[in-house]
Image: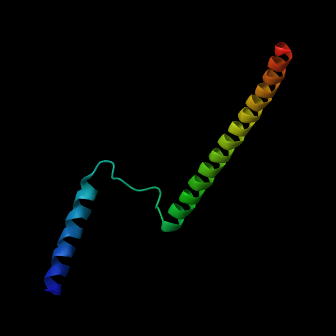
Amino acid sequence: MLQKKRERSSEYNSYIRHLRGNEKKPFQSSLAVRSKDIVEFTRRMEKRKRDMLLEHNQQRKKESMKLYGEIKTDNIKVKELQK
């Protein structure tokens, strides 16, 4: 059984080599993706996502403080007008 598997595998590999040899422009991967690269990429993406979220939260905080200041000044103006 293992012998037949090896034979079929070797036939397949020789067939693939033959097909690759006949190609005008054979595909050659210029970049081998390793698990280490994938982990590094996901870390960079997570950091980028965290940074964007932090920036968004800071922007919202600035806007809310500005709105709070406007509400305080409007309340003072309304109280002065009511007198």
Give x and y (percent) for residue 55. 68, 43
In depth, the one of 4 and 58 nearer the eye is 58
Picture colour scheme: rainbow
- Residue drawn at (77%, 30%), measured in percent from left and top? 66
- Residue drawn at (76%, 26%), measured in percent from left and top? 71
Q: In this view, does 61 lie above or below 10?
A: above
In depth, the one of 12 and 79 nearer the eye is 79
Give x and y (percent) for residue 16. 23, 63
- Residue drawn at (80%, 18%), measured in percent from left and top? 78
Q: In this view, does 39 lie above or below 53?
A: below
Would you identify the image quadrant in which residue 12 lies? bottom left
Q: Which residue lies furthest to the front in this view?
A: 83
Q: How many marks?
A: 0
Q: In this view, does 37 lie above or below 59?
A: below
In depth, the one of 9 and 48 nearer the eye is 48
Q: Describe residue 4's horizontal placement relative to residue 56 as left or right.
A: left
Q: Describe residue 59's horizontal placement relative to residue 14 as left or right.
A: right
Image quadrant occupied by the N terminus: bottom left
Image quadrant occupied by the C terminus: top right
Give x and y (percent) for residue 17. 26, 64
In depth, the one of 1 and 66 nearer the eye is 66
- Residue drawn at (84%, 23%), measured in percent from left and top? 76
Q: In this view, does 10 lie above or below 31?
A: below
Q: Describe residue 8's horizontal placement relative to residue 23 as left or right.
A: left
Q: Describe residue 3's horizontal placement relative to residue 67 as left or right.
A: left
Would you identify the image quadrant in which residue 18 lies? bottom left
Would you identify the image quadrant in which residue 40 lies? bottom right
